[in-house]
Image: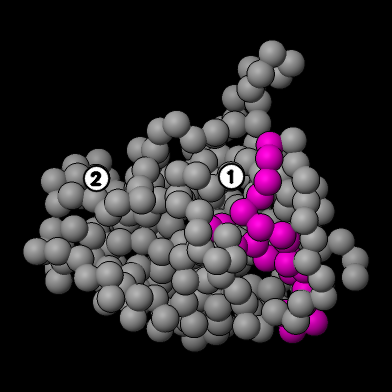
Amino acid sequence: MSEPVLGIIGGTGLTNLSSLEVSRRQVVRTPYGEPSGALTFGEIRGLPVVFLARHGYGHTIVPHQVNYRANLWAMHSVGVRKVVSVASVGGIAPELGPGVLAVPHQIIDYTWGRKSTFFEGPDQPVTHIDFTHPYTLSLREEILAAAHTAGESVVPQGVYAVTQGPRLETAAEIDRLERDGATMVGMTGMPEAALARELDVQYAAIAVVVNHAAGRGDSRDGISLDDIHAVMRQAVGRARNILETVVAAHGRP
């Protein structure tokens, strides 16, 4: 198989791709430690893809302990130049109710203590990247076009607030995020997006809304984890459908 260029990073609820015909798995050693797991190489609709489960294939790595640098470096090292991320989020905006899919266009980072750059250490020059648009515009358009082709409804934009986790947020914290302009909240969007930019890897995300954020909608008095899992099972199938269509479009000349 020729070197793949499209990578998929799956979040909560997407630890595997049922449509992926696996050819091999490869453990990649990186200067930044171990990735979340072995890279899974295979094909979707006859086209090459590399898949990685962000939280590990047993879903055992909490958001703030994901080795984002190793994950992105490993994918880049095997030839991946585009990454589509899938992440579960809580909906803050009224239109982002449970089961909705969205393609965010902006990020606000509230995390702390995570290794967030490749450019650090005594042998590395201070390097700044432009992050005005954190998601690659052309790849976002590919995802939106794929959703249309697949017949899947998506909200075409959103502001993703990234919190530290692993606990969910308080209602007052969600009020603050909303005042800041966030429309959804999750725990893994950063530093993943920034690290991809440092490696010159195109990066965009599909956000799967699995619950109303704290204090909103049916989460006004609390969040049911059982309900989250039920919504996730249904919505992740739709995200897979979009991913397959992205891959198919990516392979067309």
Question: Magenta segment: does it hold 38?
Answer: yes
Disc number placed over residue 150 in the picture, else none: none
Q: Which residues are magenta?
A: 32-55
In x, y percent, where is residue 207?
Answer: 43, 64
The vertical placement of 40 against 236, above or below, is: above
Left or right: 119 as drawn, with respect to 12? right
Figure quadrant of the C terminus: bottom right
The residue carrying pointer 2 sits among few (fewer than 14), some (14 to 19) or many (20 or more) residues within 10 Å by Cα, namely many
Between residue 39 and residue 76, name the one nearer to us: 39
Figure quadrant of the N terminus: bottom right
The vertical placement of 46 against 199, above or below, is: below
The vertical placement of 121 against 35, above or below, is: above
Going from the N terminus, do you reach mark 2 or mark 1 first? 1
Residue identified by numbered label 1: 67
Left or right: 29 as drawn, with respect to 246? right
Between residue 107 and residue 190, name the one nearer to us: 190
The residue carrying pointer 1 sits among few (fewer than 14), some (14 to 19) or many (20 or more) residues within 10 Å by Cα, namely many
The answer for how far apart the CA atoms under marks 2 and 1 are is: 25 Å
For the point 24% across and 45% down, the residue is 177
Find out whether the residues at labels 2 and 1 contact each other: C-beta distance under 8 Å. Answer: no
Residue identified by numbered label 2: 177
For the point 65% across and 26% down, the residue is 119
